[in-house]
Image: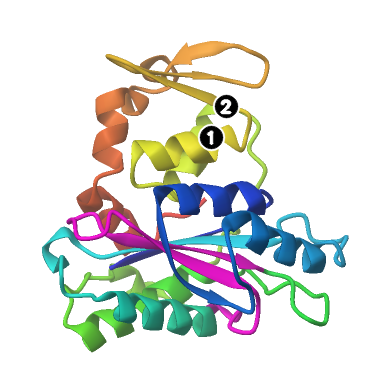
Amino acid sequence: MIAKLQSISYTSNALQYCERGGQILHSNECLGSAKQIWDQMKLLEDRNDRCEKKAFHIKIRIAPEDKSKITNQDWIDIAKDYAKKIGFQNNLYAAYIHEEGTNKEHIHIVASRIQENNLAVPDSYTHYKNMDFCRKIEKQYGLRKVDRKLEHFKAQEVFIPSDKRNCNLKDDILKAMEISDSLDDLTFHLKQQNIQTKIGRGISFIDANGVRKKGSEIDRKLSLKGIEKQLSYKNQERKFNYGITR
């Protein structure tokens, strides 16, 4: 199992993306469509003028061979457990299932970070929290275990914040890839940074200034085949093992 979390400023768009790609499984302290849930979240978000990224976008995915081991009720329980692990269990959040019944089945959670006291739920050290959570869920549901070598060095490693502003196109693409494991995901997250993605025989990107560059020109690893390889479950698992963060 792999869990990814990103603090975001585009709550409304994230909710709409999740609704378009699947169906809602569970919501906490909020009801309705993506638009209605956003309206409810916005009431809280408007009360906090200090936090720039007022929501979490989480993606939790099981290994392809674990297909059919997790029921929809299991996913709901997993979403609730994850909310407790990160600390937004009392906040407004909604969980959606995507690719249901396939070997790419996964859930998305969009959660408001803003609490009743108007403070934001912290987003520090979430990589370690994700690792601990996934280990627990793997054991609980008999899923394939991921060998997490980073755990052996946990106490010695210096935490590197992941919430840095990146100004060039390559860094923006790499950052978007960290929360993505499909081309649709990547396209969505880049769009939130005013970067268009064009896919044909290859892949190219158009930045906010209208400058278009082929992925392979930016970096050989950012060709269409290179990106597809990096977004594969096997490669995402390798990154998760070694704690690659930005």
Disc 1, SS: helix
Q: In the image, is residue 151 above or below residue 59?
A: below
- Residue under label 1, please give it: 190
Looking at the picture, how far across and down is residue 244, in whole percent? 41, 55
Name of the residue lying farthest toward the left: 65
Looking at the picture, how far across and down is residue 231, in whole percent? 30, 43
Q: In the image, is residue 74 above or below residue 217?
A: below
Q: Write down the region rendered in magenta.
A: 86-112
Disc 2, SS: loop
Q: Amino acid at mark 2?
A: Ile
Lateral position of residue 157 relative to residue 102, left or right: right
Q: Is any atom of residue 106 visible in this view?
A: yes
Q: Is any atom of residue 156 visible in this view?
A: no
Residue at the image position 64 percent from the left and 84 percent from the top: 90
Residue at the image position 38 percent from the left and 73 percent from the top: 131
- Local packing at callout 2 (Cα closer than 10 Å; few below 14, some 14-19, many 20+) is many
Looking at the picture, how far across and down is residue 144, in whole percent? 16, 72
Q: CA distance from mark 2 to mark 1?
A: 5 Å
- Local packing at callout 1 (Cα closer than 10 Å; few below 14, some 14-19, many 20+) is many
Q: Earlier in the sequence, mark 2 or mark 1?
A: 1
Name of the residue lying farthest toward the bottom: 140
